[in-house]
Image (cartoon, rainbow, N blue to C red):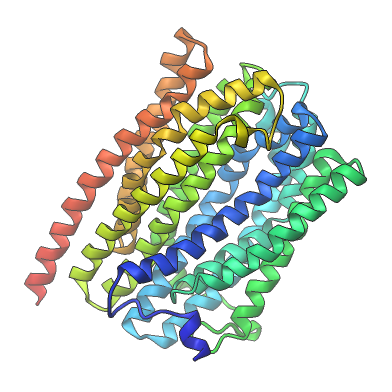
């Protein structure tokens, strides 16, 4: 009975209720993870001033640039393990689980060392304002010390999700998130450590969440059970994980690189613009994580059903995930936008900073629903084993278009509004490309499966 509560049968029965049961805890988990950073931004904004707020809030693009390629590998692990579960291949599931956990530890160490080495050079290249660069360097270096634990959590949660379990990752982040907020207040308000304090709190929280997910895997009763003595890399399975995961990671890196270019342009507008954008960006993260939960549901459900040969069910999964992602993300965007200044006050009370935050909410938050089509159809393609196609579309729509905008359009009108308009336009272009690619690939697969049958 205990096992049934943790896992779902993704291959039989109705889909809409199982997708909701899968996606909503996952969305809550991702939002809690973002609350680590949001709590950092809120605490330093209220108790350490707008410079500290800008220093912490401007680091997201740098962090994502360095971690996304390895987070992509965790997506690959999710797809491959879910497919092996659908095929009922216990031996390969076990090999994939132990390969994924060891890769998590190794990748975390690589990111930590790389991050410590390149933090200041990257921030300098991004034209980070002189009045915040030292604070930003301190925060980033402490943040990167926690990378091995963050990677271990991400891969471990991906393994649990491959069996339809999103509840235990949520529990991990609920507990570590509460600890993070308490430590933020203690280190910043009591100890007066400013950005260093919120960095330390985030690292401690990552340690807690990773230890919890590791405990769950070690005490698991199904085929995804982890044994530390069996940790080794199966290079054939690693190749399969990389085939799906590296293009997914590349897509994340592409997004991050384009965002770094935009952040560099934003930095040229001054620390108030950086702070206002950072405050409003938190609400975009919340909406994105809600719609991304349906993308992850699409990946996992599609992978298992494709492995089991349930091709028509894969199509239904995609349709439901698009519909639910659209409805939920649109509703949350409207709530945040209508609350406007009331929610921005969690991060800042300075009028100029708040005005810039409201502008970003107008142009980006209200258009966030467009990216549902780009993300969910991308997830469906990955679940079907086609990971390079969405990566290439993202390369063109996000990186290519945004770079063109920053270097061709923005110099002619150097305003915050001009800069942020690049986001919704690139989402429209990317969504159109992803929908077209999905229908072409799904028709080819259907024709191939009919011929094989």
Q: Is residue 126 at least partly visible in the picture?
A: no
Q: Residue at x 54, y 35 (%)?
A: 339
Q: How many numbered discs, if any?
A: 0
Task: State whether residue 138 appears in this view.
Answer: yes
Q: Quadrant of the C terminus?
A: bottom left
Q: Is residue 255 above or below residue 356?
A: below
Q: Position of residue 332 (x, y in %)?
A: 46, 45
Against 319, residue 350 (above or below) is above
Q: Quadrant of residue 45?
A: top right
Q: Residue at x 39, y 74 (%)?
A: 82
As displayed, is residue 268 above or below residue 433? Answer: above
Q: Position of residue 146 (x, y in %)?
A: 72, 56
- Residue 369 is drawn in which quadrant? top left
Taking the image as shown, residue 9 lies to the left or right of residue 350, namely: left
Q: Is residue 349 above or below residue 33?
A: above
Residue 424 place in picture, x, y as percent:
39, 31
Depth check: give the residue in front, 247 or 14: 14
Viewer-nearest residue: 157 or 40: 40
The residue most toward the bottom is 1
Determine whether, in the image, residue 24 is placed left or right of residue 108: left
Q: Single out the residue that lies furthest toward the right.
A: 191
Q: Residue at x 75, y 53 (%)?
A: 181
Toward the viewer: 361 or 433? 361
In the displayed structure image, the side of residue 425 where residue 287 appears, left or right: right
Quick one: which residue is furthest to the top in this view?
412
Q: Residue shown at 35%/86% (left/top)?
A: 88
Residue 229, percent across and down? 65, 85
């Amino acid at each position: 009975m205990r096992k049934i509560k943790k896992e779902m049968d993704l291959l039989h029965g109705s889909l809409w209720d199982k997708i909701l049961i899968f996606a909503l805890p996952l969305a809550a988990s991702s939002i809690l993870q973002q609350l680590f950073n949001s709590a950092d931004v809120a605490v330093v904004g209220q108790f350490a001033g707008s410079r500290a707020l800008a220093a912490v809030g401007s680091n997201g693009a740098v962090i994502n640039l360095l971690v996304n390629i390895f987070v992509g590998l965790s997506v690959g692990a999710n797809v491959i393990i879910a497919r092996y579960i659908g095929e009922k291949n216990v031996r390969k599931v076990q090999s994939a689980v132990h390969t994924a956990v060891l890769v998590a530890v190794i990748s975390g160490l690589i990111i930590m060392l790389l991050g410590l080495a390149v933090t200041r050079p990257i921030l300098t290249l991004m034209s980070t304002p002189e009045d915040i660069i030292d604070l930003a360097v301190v925060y980033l270096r402490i943040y990167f010390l926690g990378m091995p634990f963050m990677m271990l959590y991400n891969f471990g949660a991906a393994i649990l999700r491959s069996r339809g379990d999103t509840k235990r990752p949520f529990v991990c982040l609920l507990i570590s998130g509460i600890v993070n907020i308490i430590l933020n207040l203690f280190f910043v308000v009591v100890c007066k450590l400013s950005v260093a304090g919120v960095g330390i709190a985030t690292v401690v929280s990552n340690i807690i969440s990773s230890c919890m997910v590791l405990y769950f895997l070690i005490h698991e009763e199904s085929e995804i059970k982890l044994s530390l003595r069996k940790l080794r890399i199966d290079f054939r399975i690693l190749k399969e994980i990389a085939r799906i995961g590296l293009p997914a990671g590349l897509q994340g890196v592409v997004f991050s690189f384009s965002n770094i270019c935009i952040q560099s342009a934003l930095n040229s507008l001054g620390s108030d613009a950086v702070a206002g954008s950072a405050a409003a960006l938190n609400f975009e993260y919340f909406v994105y994580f809600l719609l991304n939960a349906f993308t992850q549901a699409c990946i996992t459900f599609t992978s298992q059903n494709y492995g089991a040969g349930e091709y028509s069910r894969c199509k239904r999964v995609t349709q439901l995930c698009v519909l639910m992602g659209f409805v939920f993300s649109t509703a949350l965007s409207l709530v945040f936008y209508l609350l406007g200044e009331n929610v921005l006050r969690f991060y800042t009370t300075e009028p100029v900073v708040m005005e810039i935050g409201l502008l970003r909410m107008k142009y980006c938050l209200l258009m966030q629903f467009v990216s549902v089509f780009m993300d969910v159809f991308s997830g469906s393609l990955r679940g079907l084993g086609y990971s390079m196609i969405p990566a290439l579309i993202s390369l063109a729509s996000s990186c290519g278009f945004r770079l063109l905008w920053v270097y061709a359009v923005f110099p002619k009108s150097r305003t915050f509004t001009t800069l942020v308009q690049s986001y919704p336009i690139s989402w429209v272009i990317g969504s159109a490309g992803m929908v077209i690619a999905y229908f072409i690939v799904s028709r080819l697969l259907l024709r191939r499966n009919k011929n094989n049958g």
